[in-house]
């Protein structure tokens, strides 16, 4: 009897360990806690949605990974990854040499140009000469902040914001002359009632892959080769199957994958 009880107890412990292990297998996928439509944003009920959320679900399903979307403040998202608070970043993070010193990336999963918007009826473009003397809003800890510092910082005033929404709102309120950001994110703002009334696209900046990166990838801790291989295979598979295009057509009328 004692032997039987011990066996049952051991089985219960093993079973509990199995359940705990299964729960621990869920991967926390970090996204910026600040809304970044049309890629990621919470709806009225607080449920996150957007192109990148759909992409995450498709990739994780293809790779047979259990993924849990985990909002993290953008300026702390890389430390959250390296410290183990999250396991991946899928938050429109561009693949740059500077970031690759700290983390690793999957293959590119989208790549769109950088744009500048400004008030309607005010003539200027996205060149350093045309933006000289103007105040430009950029989001902190982004490739756009780095680009604006490098190309516009000597002749323009740069104002940094924690979120893209804050920069857009200040532009609409007349407290900025221009905003630089991803062209798709800016296009989404220009489609809103606020954006339609105030602003327009002034142009695309000259590309600089050394600063703007080689497209957007999934951020991972260094050395996680198995995870990287699974993600790269999944990205390739959903591209080949047409699932990627199906997701994209829900949000855009053009291909966001890029060259």
Image (cartoon, rainbow, N blue to C red):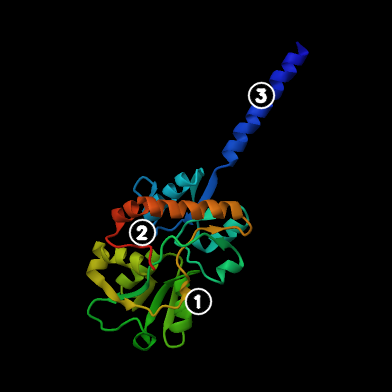
Which residue was labeled with disc 3? 12
Q: Position of residue 78 (x, y in %)?
A: 56, 61
Residue occupying the point 72% across, 19% down: 7
Q: Position of residue 220 (x, y in %)?
A: 56, 57
Which quadrant holds the N terminus?
Answer: top right
> Going from the N terminus, do you reach mark 3 or mark 1 first?
3
Q: Residues within 10 Å of mark 1 (few under 14, many from 20)?
A: few
Seen from the viewer's position, the closer of residues 235 and 26 is: 235
Residue occupying the point 45% across, 44% down: 61
Which residue was labeled with disc 2? 37
- Image-based side of 102 in relation to 207, left or right: right
Residue 86 seen in the figure:
no
Which of the labelled discs sits on residue 92, or is there none?
none
Which residue was labeled with disc 1? 210
Measure the C-alpha gap from mark 1 to mark 2. 26 Å
Measure the C-alpha gap from mark 3 to mark 1. 55 Å
Residue occupying the point 43% across, 47% down: 57
Q: Quadrant of residue 166?
A: bottom left
Q: Residues within 10 Å of mark 2 (few under 14, many from 20)?
A: many
Q: Position of residue 158 (x, y in %)?
A: 44, 79
Residue 96 seen in the figure:
yes
> Going from the N terminus, do you reach mark 3 or mark 2 first?
3
- Residues at marks 3 and 2 touching, judged by CB atoms closer than 8 Å: no
């Amino acid at each position: 009897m004692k032997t039987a009880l011990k066996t049952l107890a051991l089985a219960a412990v093993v079973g509990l360990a199995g359940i705990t292990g299964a729960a621990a297998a869920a991967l926390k996928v970090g996204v910026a806690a600040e809304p970044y439509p049309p890629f990621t944003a919470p709806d009225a009920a607080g449920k996150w949605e957007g192109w990148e959320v759909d992409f995450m679900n498709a990739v994780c399903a293809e790779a047979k990974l259990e993924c849990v979307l985990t909002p993290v403040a953008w300026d702390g998202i890389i430390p959250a990854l390296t410290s183990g608070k999250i396991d991946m970043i899928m938050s429109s993070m561009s693949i740059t040499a500077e970031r690759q010193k700290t983390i690793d990336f999957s293959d590119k999963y989208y790549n769109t140009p950088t744009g500048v918007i400004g008030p309607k009826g005010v003539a200027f473009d996205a060149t350093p000469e045309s933006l000289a003397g103007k105040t430009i809003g950029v989001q902190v800890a982004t490739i756009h902040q780095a680009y604006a510092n490098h190309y516009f910082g000597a002749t323009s005033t740069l104002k940094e914001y924690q979120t893209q929404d804050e920069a857009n709102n200040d532009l609409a309120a007349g407290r900025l002359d221009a905003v630089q950001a991803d062209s798709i994110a800016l296009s989404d703002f220009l489609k809103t009632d606020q954006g339609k009334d105030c602003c327009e696209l002034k142009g695309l900046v000259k590309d600089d892959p050394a600063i703007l990166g080689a497209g957007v990838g999934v951020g991972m801790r260094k050395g996680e080769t198995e995870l990287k291989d699974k993600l790269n295979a999944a990205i390739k598979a959903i591209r080949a199957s047409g699932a990627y295009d199906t997701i994209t057509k829900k949000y855009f009328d053009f291909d966001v994958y890029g060259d």
